[in-house]
Image (cartoon, rainbow, N blue to C red):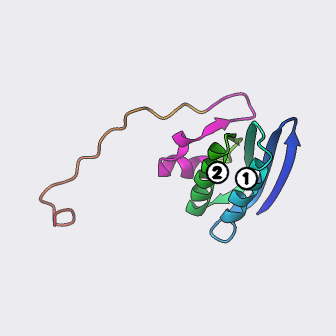
């Protein structure tokens, strides 16, 4: 994974490329925390160059967002790669983030209510 921190006016831009996995996801969170120290109005994380994204990446983004919000900084995911969007959606975390795609389109928000999953009763694999 490679990380870069740049200034875009008063905002900060963290650019991520490569693989985000258990060996390096914490570095993303640490860089976002560093960017928040100067209290910019916005920290955007550009994820367009991510080729692999693990569950550790989901945790790192959630923690980075928490750090930013606690510091009073808006946190935006910019141009998430398909692997990022897929895992965030699959994990149920996609709706927790503000997203901005470079093509001017924004993903549809998650529905406020989800279809409940009804457990199968009296099945040998699901009953105790």
Q: Residue at x 70, y 67 (%)?
A: 24
Residue 56 bears which disc, if any? Answer: none
Q: Residue at x 52, y 39 (%)?
A: 95
Q: Earlier in the sequence, mark 1 or mark 2?
A: 1
Residue in the foreground of this view, choosing between 63 and 93: 63
How far is disc 1 from disc 2 in space, using C-alphas?
8 Å
How far across and how far down the image is residue 100, in percent?
Answer: 69, 35
Residue 104 painted magenta: yes
Mark 1 crowd level (few <14, some 14–19, many ≥20, 10 Å Cα) = many
Q: Residue furthest left?
A: 122
How far across and how far down the image is residue 42, in percent?
Answer: 74, 38
- Of circles 1 and 2, the one toward us is 2
Total count of labels: 2
Q: Which residues are magenta?
A: 83-106
Q: Residue furthest top?
A: 104
- Could you tell me if the residues under marks 1 and 2 are in contact, i.e. CB atoms within 8 Å? yes
Give the residue number, with chain letter if any, for mark 2: 67
Q: Residue at x 22, y 52 (%)?
A: 119
Residue 32 bears which disc, if any? Answer: 1
């Amino acid at each position: 994974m490679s990380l870069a921190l740049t200034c875009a006016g008063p905002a900060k831009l963290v650019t991520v490329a490569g693989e985000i996995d258990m060996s390096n996801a914490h570095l993303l969170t640490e860089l976002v925390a560093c960017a928040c120290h100067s209290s910019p109005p916005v920290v955007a994380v550009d994820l367009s160059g991510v080729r692999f994204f693990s569950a550790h990446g989901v945790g790192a983004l959630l923690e980075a967002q928490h750090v930013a919000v606690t510091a009073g900084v808006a946190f935006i995911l910019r141009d998430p790669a398909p692997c990022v969007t897929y895992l965030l959606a699959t994990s149920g975390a996609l709706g927790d983030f503000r997203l901005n795609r470079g093509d001017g389109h924004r993903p549809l928000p998650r529905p406020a209510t989800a279809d409940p999953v009804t457990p199968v009763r009296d099945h040998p694999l699901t009953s105790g």
